[in-house]
Image (spheres, helix red, strand yellow):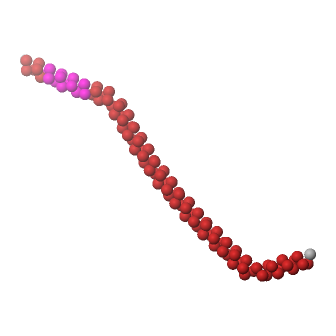
Amino acid sequence: MDSVLYKIIEIERAAQSISDEAAKARRDLPMEIDGERERLAARIEERITARVTQFDGEEREDERRQTEALEARRVQRIAALRELFQVNRAKWEAELYENIRKK
């Protein structure tokens, strides 16, 4: 009989231990969840910052390439205009002279 009582007491102690662990886990779980949430938020913030930095770099590089292309086209157009002027200068001067003379 004592053996059965000891077994019941051992089972009761084991059950109480499990119950205490569950209560502790219930108390600690919100703190663990908050900690995990903060860790995830920090990780997401880092990833967002890295992507924004990468995107910014790509956009700046794209802007630089476009600016260089525009500058190259501008230089080509100016050169074409100078060449056109050199080719037609005498003709245009003569036309202007004649237009002024007729007036």
- Judge by depth and name the residue closer to the eye, 16 or 43: 43
Position of residue 95 in the picture relative to residue 63 (left or right): right
- Judge by depth and name the residue closer to the eye, 11 or 74: 74
Q: Residue at x 14, y 23 (%)?
A: 10
Whether 100 is among the magenta residues is no
Establish if 5 lies above or below 47. Answer: above
Quadrant assignment for the C terminus: bottom right
Residue 22 quadrant: top left
Where residue 64 appears, as percent x and y from the top left, is: 55, 61
Query: Would you say the magenta stretch is mainly helix, strand or loop?
Result: helix
- Judge by depth and name the residue closer to the eye, 6 or 87: 87
Establish if 33 lies above or below 4. Answer: below
Whether 18 is among the magenta residues is yes
Position of residue 60 in the picture relative to residue 78 (left or right): left
Q: Residue at x 87, y 77 (%)?
A: 99
Residue 29 quadrant: top left
Where residue 19 appears, as percent x and y from the top left, is: 24, 25
Position of residue 23 in the picture relative to residue 85 (left or right): left
Q: Residue at x 75, y 80 (%)?
A: 88
Q: Which residues are magenta?
A: 8-21
Where residue 34 appears, as percent x and y from the top left, is: 38, 34
Where residue 66 appears, as percent x and y from the top left, is: 57, 63
Residue 15 quadrant: top left
